[in-house]
């Protein structure tokens, strides 16, 4: 016996109501999933923001009080310090201009002077080839009393050497309570060697440079020391011999 028209309408309504119920249920689940994802993303953002200072605090605690001399090789891996009369103090060139330096790496010379670009901030102690400022920026840091540890591409490929260099940078950062340990570690790349036509002496993969001022003689000097390996003891001795206070512009950051 065929269903009545009224019964068919009732069946169709039940089907439609069931479909709507399922759709609403699916929409609610989808909404909860979206809210959940948004909450997770927010937590990750907040967590990342909180993690950075926590990580910094942990790093500082790890290296606080550590002796630079205990890191890396002994000072015997480094040669004698050499000096050369310097030029370029106060000589600023536009940041669009590249300076051809006569030494690998430079210890003095003309340089950039642009807020936010040169000199590079003291808080950045260690650079890779991808993060390093231009030479013209770092030379400005040298004028302000920084010691720069330069490492060539052989050292850059040696995980042990990089670990030692990073430890030196972290140690100096952790123990610099009044911004008197002006230090940076930066790579000397093949591009730098090609641009300047200079490279480290054969067998040497690390270099320290500093720009000192001799007020009595009205002269300034660039200082270099090359090493076959990274040596915290040699770096410590070098920075004690050349404190930031002896630079052409020591109290400018």
Image: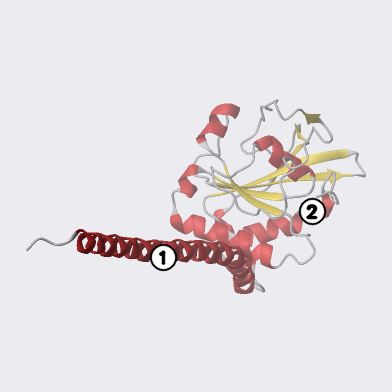
Label ID, residue 209: none
Label ID, residue 244: 2
| Residue depicted at 82% across the width and 36% down the height | 89
Counting from the top left corner in percent of width and height, residue 77 is at 54, 55
Label ID, residue 28: 1
> Is 78 on the left or on the right of 219, as rendered?
left
Asked if one can make out residue 107 in the rendered structure from this viewpoint, the answer is no
Counting from the top left corner in percent of width and height, residue 96 is at 70, 26
Distance, label 2 to label 1, CA atoms, is 65 Å
Q: Relative to 235, is 101 above or below?
A: above
Residue depth check, mark 2 versus mark 1: number of the one nearer the observer: 1
The N terminus lies in which quarter of the figure? bottom left
| Residue depicted at 66% across the width and 51% down the height | 184
Secondary structure beneath dot 2 equals helix
| Residue depicted at 69% across the width and 60% down the height | 237
Q: In the image as oriented, which residue stretches furthest toward the left? A: 1
First in sequence, mark 2 or 1: give its number.
1
Asked if one can make out residue 96 in the rendered structure from this viewpoint, the answer is yes
Which of 186 and 206 lies nearest the eye of the viewer?
A: 186
How crowded pointer 1 is (Cα within 10 Å; few <14, some 14-19, many 20+) is rated as few
Counting from the top left corner in percent of width and height, residue 145 is at 78, 49
Which of 207 and 190 lies nearest the eye of the viewer?
A: 190
């Amino acid at each position: 016996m065929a269903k009545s028209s009224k019964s068919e309408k009732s069946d169709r309504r039940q089907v439609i109501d069931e479909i709507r119920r399922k759709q609403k249920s699916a929409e609610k689940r989808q909404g909860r999933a979206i809210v959940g994802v948004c909450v997770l993303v927010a937590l990750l953002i907040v967590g990342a923001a909180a993690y950075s200072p926590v990580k910094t605090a942990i790093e500082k605690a790890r290296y606080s009080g550590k002796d630079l001399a205990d890191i890396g090789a002994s000072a015997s891996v480094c040669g004698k310090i050499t000096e050369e009369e310097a030029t370029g103090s106060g000589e600023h060139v536009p940041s669009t201009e590249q300076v051809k330096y006569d030494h690998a790496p430079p210890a003095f010379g003309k340089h950039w002077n642009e807020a936010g670009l040169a000199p590079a901030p003291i808080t950045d102690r260690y650079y890779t080839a991808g993060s390093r400022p231009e030479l013209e920026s770092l030379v400005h840091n040298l004028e302000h009393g920084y010691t720069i540890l330069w490492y060539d591409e052989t050292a850059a490929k040696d995980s042990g050497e990089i670990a030692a260099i990073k430890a030196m940078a972290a140690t100096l950062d952790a123990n610099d309570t009044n911004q008197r340990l002006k230090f940076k570690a930066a790579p000397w790349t093949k591009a730098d060697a090609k641009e300047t036509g200079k490279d480290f002496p054969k067998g040497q993969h690390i270099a320290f440079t500093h720009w000192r001022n001799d007020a009595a003689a009205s002269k300034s000097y660039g200082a270099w020391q090359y090493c076959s390996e990274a040596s915290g003891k040699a770096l410590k001795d070098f920075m004690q011999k050349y404190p930031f206070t002896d630079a052409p512009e020591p109290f400018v950051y």
